[in-house]
Amino acid sequence: MMKLHNVINIVADVSPVNFGVWKAATVGAAFLRSHGVESSLWVTSGDVKNANSSLETISIDNFSVDQLAGLVKSKQLSPNETIIVTHGSWLKPTRFGYELAKVGFRWVYVPQGMLEPWSFNQKKLKKKIYYTLFENKFIQRATAVRAVSAIEQKNLNGLLNRSIQLIPNGVPVHGYSAKPHGTAQFLYMARLHYKKGIFPLVKAWDKSMRDADAKLVICGYDEGELEKIRPFINGNIEYLDFVSGDDKIKLLKGSHYIVLPTSSEGLPSGVLEGMSFGLIPVISDGCNLPEVFKEHLGVRVEQDENNIAEQLTILRNKPFDQILSKRNHDYIGEHFSEDRTGEKLLELYRHLTDGSILHQ
């Protein structure tokens, strides 16, 4: 019987634009370490300094397949003791997962929302050709495919016609503290990409909240939308760029609502983080978090300026719900904590190493 000792997480890069993917790759590592399993982060492109991770982080930028094999040999990594996990689709991590699977390693493929219908339909012809010639061929070698939300699991099952393992991304969960009274702070914490709905959000805010006792704080790496929203950044809208560490924790503690009217996600860690700090989610169906609406934890919005403005007006005219805030914190602690994710990952990886899950 194999005994699990190592988990190698392979990601495309650790830049701010890829933050959600590579950060999700580190979730559960502390729990795995407490059970004798060490995790590493291998990065196929770019500088690794941005990772700032407790995991061993190795650059494999511009590595060939032979160089990858050499690294595996130098690290004395045995297929009998090591799980390979690749995060994201379309790029070199998938190719490397495939090559390592060919020489006997168990490989878990985690697309992190990149094969969701909306994402798949962007540059559709190019992706369809690449998927047919390469990506799908590579995926067939994966020992297991992991979805990070129930909706993604359903979509992947239909696309790949195989069993899909569901293990949501997790987030750290801190002790709860009641939200400050006074000005209600709404937080948008995601990339400034058109699919995330930042432009209709700021237009809706300008329409319904310009003179409200409220504030919209926008933080995230710009991917082309900053120029569009810049005329609206005044008064009670503030842009902070990308935030992390203690600055992010301070921001989360001082905010009341987390807002994301996105078209598509795998599972947005920023929303989970906000909820873990007691922020009430104001989100779209594209967040792949139907639990928010099923459990009456937040507000549904569409990626539509008028709809968002209508929902913001409703929130403007009622007091912040501290009880609902606490319910959000508790719900994330029970279902989406780092340790909960770590438990599920350990269970999956052990099943893979003992052979009870093989190429499902």
Image: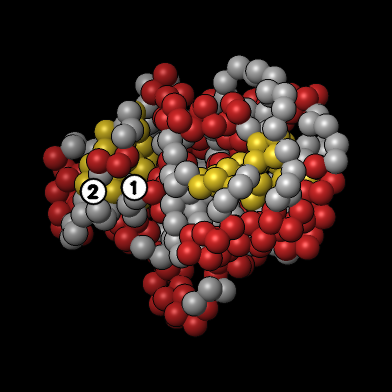
Is 95 or 230 nearer to us in this picture? 230
Percent x, y for residue 72?
Answer: 20, 44
Horizontal placement of 12 versus 289: left or right? left
Q: Amino acid at mark 1?
A: Val
Percent x, y for residue 147?
Answer: 57, 50
| Label drawn at residue 244 | none
Q: Amino acid at mark 2?
A: Asp
Residue carrying label 1: 14
Q: CA distance from mark 1 to mark 2?
A: 7 Å
Horizontal placement of 282 versus 143: left or right? right
Q: Residues within 10 Å of mark 2 (few under 14, many from 20)?
A: some
Residue carrying label 2: 47
Horizontal placement of 213 versus 155: left or right? right
Q: Is residue 340 above or below residue 125?
A: above
State the residue at coordinates (39%, 23%): 33
Q: Earlier in the sequence, mark 1 or mark 2?
A: 1
Is 224 or 44 nearer to us in this picture? 224
State the residue at coordinates (78%, 25%): 322
Percent x, y for residue 179?
Answer: 69, 24
What kind of element bears circle 2?
loop
Percent x, y for residue 285?
Answer: 72, 55
User: Label 2 near label 1: C-beta < 8 Å?
Assistant: yes
Instruction: Quadrant for residue 245, please give it.
Output: top left
